[in-house]
Amino acid sequence: MYKTIEDEVLRKSAPAKLKAEFLQHEFDRLRSFCVLIYIASIAIWIAYDLILSFIGGQPFTWLSLVFIGAFATFVIVLRLIRDARHFQTLNLLFVFAMAFGTRLLTEGLPDDHQPGWLLLAASTTLFTASVLPLNRWSFFAAQIVTWSFLNPFYNTDLGHMELRGVMAISYSAFICGLTIYSFLTLRKAKLYNFIMSKLLLDQAYIDTLTEIPNRRSFMTRANQHLNKVPRENDHYLAMVDIDNFKKVNDVHGHDIGDEVLKRIAQDIKSVMTRHEYARLGGEEFAVYLAGARREDAEALAAELCQVVREQATRYPVTISIGLARVLDGDTLNQALVKADEALYEAKHTGKDRYTFHQ
């Protein structure tokens, strides 16, 4: 089964919306790692500055302090941002500052030393970019910025046709190819793993027919609200059942019954969108209203009954709703039993109504 799902995922191209969701997920998961990479990059740049100060005979100047201050600002901003799209721009600016600062450092070196240090700096920058949660345009833009500033042939005595020049070209091509391949391969593998995880999670927690959460999802989410301390206002649990649903199946067939289930699920989703809702099984649904007052629960139940009743369709149905207040100390199963008792009362006092558990 896993192999079948995997083959299905590999055959399809991920939509842009899913890629954006994946990128945001990766950035949220790796934000601390990004901060660590930035700090390590700054430390390497400072060490690079100190080494070149001795080799090139150029002292540690105020300009170095300006760059270090700018780098520290990037780290602070990185810790504050939450949107992956903003990180793409921030990282490009960070690479620009790093590459520009490094180029200025190498200007004071002897001509025969500059190409080697520029290649070393370029390879370090590109490898760092390849492991960060970047999208394609940001990564390739970082490549362009890096080689624009750290080109070992620009303003140096290195010739393209001499031995050192050919070696520099070969090394540059190797670094470019390796980092691009690593970035694209890792990104593709992570993206497919994300899609697989999301797909399997959806199958585990989403009802396949109605495309709303299933019982497992509801029990998990409702328990989280139930166990939250302190509680916000009261909590209510609603059980929703389609009236005379067996008759719908017997008269019109199960295909029509499925259409009715999907329609009721969408009605519940539209009315109860701020609360936890799910299909528990068959024609039974549940809603957990956390932080609601009694009049709120009553108004929502009345609205849902009205929406279902007045919906223009070839196969009209009504629903009954049982409501129970979730008391301190109640378990979720106890609350479900009370709501089910209230639903039983609504069913046997005329249907198409809601009833509170006494």
Image: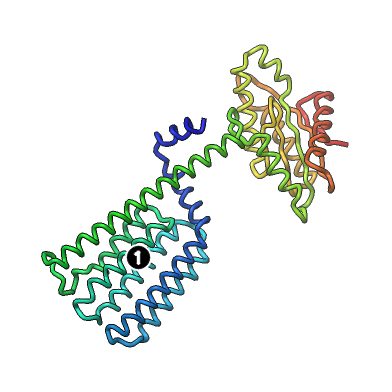
Image position, residue 37 (x, y; %): 45, 65
Figure check: 137 above or below 194:
below
Q: Residue furthest right?
A: 358
- At horizontal 44% and vertical 60% (from top left) the residue drawn is 87
Pinpoint residue 220: horizontal percent, then vertical percent.
69, 42
Q: Tell me which colouring the rendered structure shows.
A: rainbow
Image-based side of 212 in relation to 68, left or right: right
Q: Is residue 175 left or right of residue 47?
A: left
Could you tell me residue 268's position as x and y percent? Answer: 66, 34
Q: Residues within 10 Å of mark 1 (few under 14, many from 20)?
A: many
Residue name at image x 79 percent, y 36 percent? 336
Q: Secondary structure at mark 1?
A: helix
Q: Can you name the residue that lies furthest to the top here?
A: 251
Q: Give the vertical position of 182 relative to 7 (above or below).
A: below
Residue marked by disc 1: 125
Q: Nearer the viewer, residue 328 or 1?
A: 1
Screen quadrant of the C terminus: top right
How many numbered discs sit on the rendered protein?
1
Quarter of the view holding residue 171: bottom left
Does residue 37 sit above or below 314 in this rendering?
Answer: below
Relative to the observer, which residue lies in front, 117 or 61? Answer: 117
Instruction: Out of 91 and 297, give the one closest to the viewer.
Output: 91
- Residue at 60% x, 18% y: name it: 256
* Residue 314 horizontal side relative to residue 330, left or right: left
Q: Quadrant of residue 115?
A: bottom left
Q: Position of residue 260 (x, y in %)?
A: 63, 23
What amino acid is found at the position of numbered circle 1 in the picture?
A: Thr
* Quarter of the figure with residue 209: top right
